[in-house]
Amino acid sequence: MTSKKHSLELAVQDLDGARTALRVGATRIELCGALGVGGLTPSIGAVEQAVEAAQLAGAADFVHVLVRPRPGGFVYSADEVDTSIRDIRAVRAAGAAGVVIGALTASGLVDKAVTAELIAAAEGMQVTFHRAIDAVESPLHTADVLVGLGLSRVLTSGGAARSIDGIETLTALKAHVGDRLQIMAGGGVRVEDIGALLAAGLDAVHLSAKTTVADPSPSGPGGGAQSYDRTDGDIAAAAAAAVMAATLEP
């Protein structure tokens, strides 16, 4: 059998999700809050809990933290950049292995200056550029920019709503960058898509493996929705099995 190095990243929102990811053998997590709006920077308490769980499991490079100060687009004010820099320093001090970032200019290009500031704040941590790349006009040129900035990997759906529908762009991206940048498929990934995505030569897949559960407790008129998302252990385990099947080929 031949072995390829493929990674599974699970987007989780809390300690329970981190523990589930550890249990099924995920390579790493993207810890975030508010997955319903695409993810925001999680609380420092959640970061500390996830790091502690990873340390107990001996998973040193496990916790990667999304740093995104608000929903919406990826053009940030000076104050929002400052917030992100402070958050990066905080999660680094908490022991996280990496951060996930993304910043664009008003013209739809990678904001090199802001990205460089965020990378500098990370001080040697692994840095992933998130799906802000799916809003740019030329992903191949953007990938070259990210390589030049020193990014570790990029999370992308190939510009499509679902990664499997962007597989041609994803394949072209991987062929273009080779080993200079890890290409991780993320965005609407289903377990049944994983084999095809990894067979296309991509380095990793990313999914939330989440399910929505009803909250029976009263929320009152200001309490928000009567449901919330949590990591589904069965979906996470199936995703891990699909990655393993793609990694070990006859």
Image (cartoon, rainbow, N blue to C red):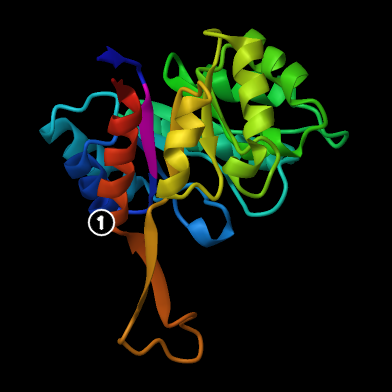
With respect to residue 130, does 249 lie above or below?
A: above
Picture coordinates of residue 193, whole percent (x, y): 48, 43
Q: Which residue is mark 1?
A: 234
Q: Is residue 205 left or right of residue 163?
A: left
With respect to residue 118, does 218 lie above or below?
A: below
Choose top left, top right, bottom left or bottom right for residue 227: bottom left
Q: Residue at x 25, y 47 (%)?
A: 237
Q: How many marks?
A: 1
Magenta: main secondary structure:
strand
Q: Residue at x 80, y 28 (%)?
A: 109
Q: In the image as oriented, which residue stretches furthest toward the front?
A: 250
Count residues near mark 1 (Cα–Cα under 10 Å), then give few for <14, some for 14-19, many for 20+. few
The magenta span reads: 6-10
Give the amino acid at mark 1.
Asp
- Label 1: state its secondary structure: helix
Picture coordinates of residue 119, whole percent (x, y): 55, 20
Res. 94 in view = no
Q: Residue at x 62, y 34 (%)?
A: 167
Q: Residue at x 28, y 31 (%)?
A: 244
Q: Is residue 155 left or right of residue 249?
A: right
Res. 1 in view = yes
Specify the quadrant that holds the C terminus. Answer: top left
In reply to whether residue 153 is colored magenta, the answer given is: no
Picture coordinates of residue 209, whole percent (x, y): 38, 53
Specify the quadrant that holds the N terminus. Answer: top left
Q: Nearer the viewer, residue 72 or 113?
A: 72
Q: Is residue 143 left or right of residue 215?
A: right
Q: In the image as oriented, which residue stretches furthest toward the left?
A: 56
Picture coordinates of residue 43, whole percent (x, y): 39, 50
